[in-house]
């Protein structure tokens, strides 16, 4: 298996820049997610790694070797698409061993490989079946089998679960991740679903308009977003933004939200102007006597907890609170913020302001 | 708006049971969600109310009057489908006006204008009224489809998975919007879905269907906290309720075959030791995929907890649910 390093990768289509200047590293054995809305450049990035697109500029290294100019066939990468492309006239067995046959592998070796792969995927009992009659899950497994059987350096997966319905998708996601844990194969996975990325990924690259917004472990990205885009895209409901005008100086541990002082992580940079206070729904608690007042608009019961929507002087916020705490529409309540979890953003640049919380993450982003 | 009563309603298609002996009252102004997996009879129930299917047995009453003898148009119900069916050659405004121009209604133009304005405002599509529907995004098209139902003043709105073809972000938005619309109009709504979040967050009442039968009917909280069976317990809650052998922890009541543990029924730190196979950091909480005495289960932890793959964790139940050999809840 392999380590993949991307350096200043860029792709233009005429005047349109699909990928601006990406740099990141996929460690050997990582399950690596490229996440972003449609059109953000995630699929283009993956296709460049696989050699299906040639970069306009920049380098791609696989295990230290510069492959930027090499054709796809010489990169030893297996691709799994959203629509499982199987040969409809062949049975499961022949679909899986097709790549090995075309390489001219000796028959005994093919047989051993097939036995190994079908065991990993749990499809030993359907090897003789035609693929046309298979369920969606089995088709997916066969497509994976055909990728695995080649022992490639890395797997590229382009929304492989996108076409499946919700309940089944969750099961397949677990299966895919368990498969990865057994094989430890370097995998790059493209998705627009933030939950899928958080659930399956060791690391996530968040992209928007061809630019990498942030790169890191799921929980770090969630807790310490580098930009307002990341804060909004990751998490459901997403991070709350309270808009206010004010200033912060280095070493400040509080900001004035209107006339209300809010404790924040020690700030490491100065900024004056339009600011945004970002806080996750689960870091807001409701209290009767809290000084920062808000009106309850609605509550959504979720069983383990509930989401309460509130109106404040600085915009609407959502709080995730215990299901047994009462919050009735029309009531006025106080809000308390978990002060260690607050990120301040500069409204204009939409970037996080450096603080003790996100120190080390922002430079790395 | 109206109260709709289903009484002992049954419908089969050859040997296949559509719905069987369904009795249910949809109170005036309620938002009732029928929940169940594909093929359970949800859509058939809607179609029976709309008059698109004829029941083999039973009655449908609207405000106390049987409507079985009426055709779909006379029943005064509106239906929103999963796939928005709009007229592609007409503008948003014309699509919204279409139902009002029906010869049965003969709505005056002034009233049509007034209604379209109201509905467009509620759905936040005022600025799109003169656009062709083909120029809209998927979410906007579905809002127009919902709007076409809302311009009428039916006795009940019937909705068949109206959000399922939309992407996640948009679905979240429209969910909140539908609930708001329901509250501001005081409308009676029957909504069909297999999506538990939609059922939990929007419904005033949830009806759970199993093989064509209504097995439980109540508020989302009742259904979640007091399910009558393992089947119902598995319909609501994310992650799904863990179902383990009843004798695993001891102290099981007589007749119990399985113990149902939602994540909030699990006390960590004492009891039986399990192994953590995988840790999922979902941001607001962390999921632990564990094996416990050879059984897979999921527990939930605070994101700050440093638990990792390969660790052991002891767990014990707290106010769990017990089910008998038939999956029926033991109280």
Image: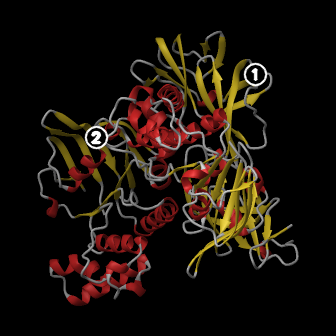
SS class, disc 2: strand
Taking the image as shown, residue B46 lies to the left or right of residue B2, namely left
Of badges 1 and 2, nearer the viewer stands: 1
| Left or right of A153 on screen, residue B53 | right
Q: In the image, is B69 to the left or to the right of A16?
A: right
Compared to residue A306, the image places residue A274 above or below, namely above
At 21% from the left and 64% from the top, the residue drawn is: A76
Q: Which residue is mark 1?
A: A290
Query: Any mark on residue A158, and which?
Result: none
Seen at 50% across and 20% down, the residue is: A268
The answer to whether one can see residue B286 in this image is no
Chain for mark 2?
A
Q: Classify 10 Å Cα crowding around label 2: few (below 14), some (14-19), many (20 and above).
A: some
Depth order, front residue of A179/B43: B43
Quadrant position of the C terminus of chain A in the picture: top left
Instruction: Report the quarter where the N terminus of chain A lies.
Output: bottom left
- The crowding category of the residue bearing disc 1, from other C-alpha atoms within 10 Å (few below 14, some 14 to 19, many at least 20), is some
The quadrant in which residue A106 appears is: bottom left
Determine whether B260 is above or below A202 in the image. Answer: below
Task: Answer with mark 1 or mark 2, whichever residue precedes in sequence.
Answer: 2
Residue placed under numbered mark 2 in the picture: A23
Q: Observer-nearest residue: B95 or A195?
A: B95
The image shows residue B260 at horizontal and vertical percentages of: 74, 66
Residue B46 vs residue A205, the one in the foreground: B46
How far apart marks 1 and 2 lie (CA) works out to 45 Å
Q: How many marks?
A: 2
For disc 1, the chain is A
Q: Residue at x 20, y 35 (%)?
A: A17
Which of the 4 image quarters holds residue A317?
top right
Quadrant assignment, res A363: top left
């Amino acid at each position: 298996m392999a380590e993949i390093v991307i350096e200043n990768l860029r792709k233009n289509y005429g005047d349109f820049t699909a990928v601006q200047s990406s740099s990141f590293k996929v460690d050997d054995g990582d399950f690596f997610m490229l996440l972003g809305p449609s059109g953000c450049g995630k699929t283009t990035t993956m296709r460049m790694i696989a050699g299906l697109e040639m970069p306009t500029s920049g380098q791609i290294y696989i295990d230290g070797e510069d492959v930027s100019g090499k054709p796809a066939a010489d990169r030893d990468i297996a691709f799994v698409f959203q629509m499982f492309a199987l040969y409809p006239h062949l049975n499961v067995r022949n679909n899986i061993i097709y790549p090995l046959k075309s390489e001219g592998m000796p028959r005994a070796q093919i047989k051993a490989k097939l036995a190994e792969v079908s065991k990993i995927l749990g499809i030993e009992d359907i090897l003789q079946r035609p693929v046309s009659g298979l369920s969606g899950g089995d088709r997916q497994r066969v497509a994976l089998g055909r990728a695995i059987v080649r022992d490639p350096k890395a797997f590229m997966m382009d929304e492989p679960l996108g076409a499946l319905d919700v309940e089944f998708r969750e099961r397949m996601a677990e299966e895919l991740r368990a498969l990865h844990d057994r094989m430890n194969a370097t995998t790059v996975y493209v998705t627009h679903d933030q939950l899928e990325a958080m659930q399956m990924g060791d690391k996530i690259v968040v992209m928007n308009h061809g630019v990498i917004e942030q790169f890191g472990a799921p929980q770090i990205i969630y807790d310490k977003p580098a930009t307002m885009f990341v804060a909004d895209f990751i998490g459901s409901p997403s991070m709350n933004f309270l808009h206010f005008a004010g200033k912060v100086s280095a070493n400040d541990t509080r900001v004035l939200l209107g006339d209300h002082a809010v404790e924040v992580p020690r700030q490491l940079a100065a900024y004056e102007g339009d600011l945004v206070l970002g806080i996750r729904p689960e870091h807001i608690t409701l209290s009767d006597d809290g000084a920062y007042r808000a009106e309850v608009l609605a509550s959504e019961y979720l069983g383990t907890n509930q989401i309460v929507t509130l109106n404040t002087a600085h915009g609407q916020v959502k709080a995730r609170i215990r299901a047994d705490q009462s919050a009735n529409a029309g009531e006025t309540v106080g809000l308390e913020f978990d002060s260690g979890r607050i990120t301040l953003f500069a409204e204009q640049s939409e970037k996080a302001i450096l603080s003790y919380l996100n120190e080390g993450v922002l430079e790395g982003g | 708006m109206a109260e709709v009563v289903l009484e002992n309603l049954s419908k089969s298609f050859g040997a296949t049971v559509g719905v069987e002996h369904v009795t249910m009252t949809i109170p005036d102004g309620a938002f009732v969600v029928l929940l169940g997996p594909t093929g359970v009879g949800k859509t058939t129930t809607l179609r029976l109310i709309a008059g698109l299917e004829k029941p083999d047995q039973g009655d449908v009453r609207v405000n106390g009057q049987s409507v079985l003898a009426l055709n779909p148009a006379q029943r005064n119900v509106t239906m929103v489908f999963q796939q928005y069916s709009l007229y592609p050659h007409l503008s948003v405004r014309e699509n919204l006006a279409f139902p009002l121009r029906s010869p049965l209604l003969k709505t005056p133009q002034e009233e049509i204008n007034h209604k379209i304005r109201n509905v467009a405002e509620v759905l936040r599509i005022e600025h799109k009224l003169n656009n062709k529907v083909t120029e809209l995004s998927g979410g906007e098209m579905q809002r127009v489809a919902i709007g076409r139902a809302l311009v009428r003043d039916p006795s009940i709105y019937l909705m068949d998975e109206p959000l399922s073809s939309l992407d996640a972000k948009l679905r979240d938005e429209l969910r909140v919007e539908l609930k708001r619309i329901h509250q501001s109009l005081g409308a009676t709504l029957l909504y069909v879905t297999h999506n538990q979040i939609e059922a939990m967050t929007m419904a005033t009442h949830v009806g759970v269907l199993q093989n064509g039968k209504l097995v439980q009917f109540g508020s989302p909280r009742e259904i979640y906290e007091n399910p009558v069976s393992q089947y119902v317990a598995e319909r609501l809650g994310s992650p799904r309720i863990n179902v383990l052998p009843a004798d695993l922890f001891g102290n099981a009541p007589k007749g119990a075959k399985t113990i149902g543990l939602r994540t909030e029924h699990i006390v960590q730190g004492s009891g039986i030791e399990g192994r953590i196979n995988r840790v999922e950091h979902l941001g607001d909480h962390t999921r632990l995929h564990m094996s416990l005495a050879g059984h897979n289960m999921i527990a939930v932890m605070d994101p700050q907890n440093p638990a990792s793959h390969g660790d052991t964790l002891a767990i014990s139940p707290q106010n769990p649910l017990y089910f008998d050999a038939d999956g029926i809840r033991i109280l």
